[in-house]
Amino acid sequence: NDDDMDLDINASEEDIQNYKLEKTLTGKAYDVVTRLFTALAKKNAIIPGDYRTAKNEHGITCSYRAASGQLYPLNKYFLFVVKPVILISFDDIVTLSFQRTGNINQHRFFSLIIKHKRGISYEYTNIDKSEYAPLLEFLKSKNLNIQDDANVSEKKTDFDDDDDDLSESDEEDYVAEEEDEEDDNDDDDEYDDEDDDK
C-alpha cells in the first residue's frame, strides 16, 4: 500500500524507549509497518532493493520446480517467494548462468541458474525475455561471477527481437511436444531457506 499513514503507538514511555520507537510513526504504509516490526522483533527486515524489472517492478515472475512465484534481486540476496521461500546470499553464489527455455516458443523465455557454494543449483525458469537485459546489468553491477550461456549471449539480437506469435510449424511442434511430455509434477512441500544470519 503506497498510501501515507500516521500510526499512534499504544505503549508506555518505557517500552517506546526500549524499542527505540516514536509515539507516532508517519510515512508510507509499507514503510511504517516495516519500521514497527523491525523495532519490535529487533531484526532487520528484508525490503526490496534498487532493482527494477522491465515493468518497473521489484520482483521477477518465474517458476521454481513446480511452483510459480516472484524472484526479488535484493542488494545482497536473492529472495524467492511464495513457496518454497528461498533466500540466497550473494556471498554464497559460485556462478550464475542463463539458458533459453520456454514451452510455447523457445525464444520467449529464459532460465536463471544459481550455483550455490554448497553444491546446490537453483534454477528459476519461465522468465520473460524482456527481463534479460535489466537482470544481467544488475548482476554485473554486483560483481557476481556470470557464466552467460552462449545460446543467449551470442544471439542476443534474435533473443530481443523474436516475434511472440507462433508459426504453424511452431504450433505443430508444440502440440506434439505436449502430447509426448510426461506429467512430472514434483510438488515438493519442502521449505528451502538459505537464510544465513546477517
Image (cartoon, rainbow, N blue to C red):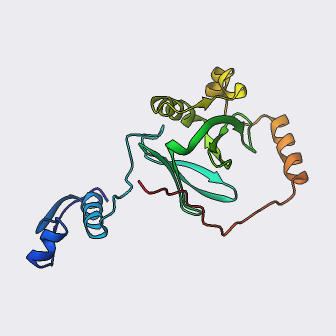
Rendered location of residue 126, percent (x, y): 65, 46
Q: Which residue lies at the image location 49% right of the left edge and 56% below the top edge?
A: 196
| Quarter assignment of residue 186 | bottom right
Q: Which residue lies at the image location 14% right of the left edge and 78% below the top edge?
A: 11
Q: Which residue lies at the image location 65% right of the left edge and 27% below the top edge?
A: 159
Q: Is residue 13 left or right of residue 127?
A: left
Pick the front one: 196 or 79: 196
Rendered location of residue 16, percent (x, y): 14, 71
Q: Is residue 4 left or right of residue 169?
A: left
- Where's the N terminus, which quadrant? bottom left
Rendered location of residue 29, percent (x, y): 26, 61
- In the rendered image, the vertical position of residue 141 relative to residue 104, given as above or below: above
Q: Which residue lies at the image location 16% right of the left edge and 70% below the top edge?
A: 18
Q: Is residue 80 left or right of residue 187?
A: left
- In the rendered image, the vertical position of residue 98 relative to residue 19, given as above or below: above
| Quarter assignment of residue 111 | top right
